[in-house]
Image (tube, rainbow, N blue to C red):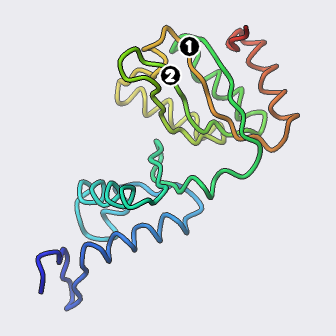
Amino acid sequence: MSSDIILCEGGICVRAEERRQAVLKLIEQSEKPVSAAALASRFSVSRQIIVGDIALLRAAGAEISATPRGYVILRDRMAGMVKRIACRHSAEDMEAELNAVVDQGCTVVDVIVEHPIYGQLTGPLHLSSRYDVARFIARSAEEDALPLSNLTEGIHLHTLLCPDEAAFLRVRAALGELGILLEG
């Protein structure tokens, strides 16, 4: 047998490529993000092996995105109207901003900042509910992590997925009331 055999259990050996294809299939079929820890447990490998598998799948062309809640296939998640908004606020206002978006029925797909050295930096979020926002904020606090917008004095963009133009207009109005919407 070749050296790419990773797991032998109960007489069944799974090759790395077979595991990667199974990982991709699970992510594609899942209705929600799938964490690296859950995949590692499922395939009896380390989380780092899964991270490597995801990197190889991406290099092979799979459209896998890592979100704070796990891996997703973006093309399956982008149904609706995609819009961008520019915002400016402090880290303390992040939860209010995100809730203002999800309360109007939209999903916060990502956050984008312009970095002086690296150019555009994008962080996938995929937040669709107050529950998602609360988990994201809690994880930020647990990790003592600063938002990307701290790199740009609070200025950032969000890609939004909205069911229709009316929902997007409600988001703009809500963010305007909060004094967060950046307008020219």
Q: Residue at x 31, y 59 (%)?
A: 56
- For mark 1, what is the residue? 155
Identify the disc placed on residue 26. none
Disc 2 to disc 1, how far (Cα)? 7 Å
Side of 65 relative to 80 (left or right)? left
- Say above or below: 96 vs 129: above
Q: Quadrant of residue 24?
A: bottom left
**Percent x, y for residue 109?**
60, 39
Q: Residues within 10 Å of mark 1 (few under 14, many from 20)?
A: many
Q: Residues within 10 Å of mark 2 (few under 14, many from 20)?
A: many
Q: Amino acid at mark 2?
A: Val
Q: Quadrant of residue 167?
A: top right
Task: Look at the image and tell me in which quarter the N terminus lies.
Answer: bottom left
* 66 or 40, nearer to the observer: 66
**Percent x, y for residue 37?**
34, 56
Specify which label sits upstream in the sequence, 2 or 1.
Answer: 2
* SS at circle 2: strand
Q: Amino acid at mark 1?
A: Ile
Q: Mark 2 and 1 residues: CB-CB less than 8 Å, in contact?
A: yes
Q: Residue at x 58, y 34 (%)?
A: 133
Q: Residue at x 84, y 27 (%)?
A: 169
* SS at circle 1: strand
How many labels sit on residues?
2
Task: Look at the image and tell me in which quarter the C terminus lies.
Answer: top right
- For mark 2, what is the residue? 113
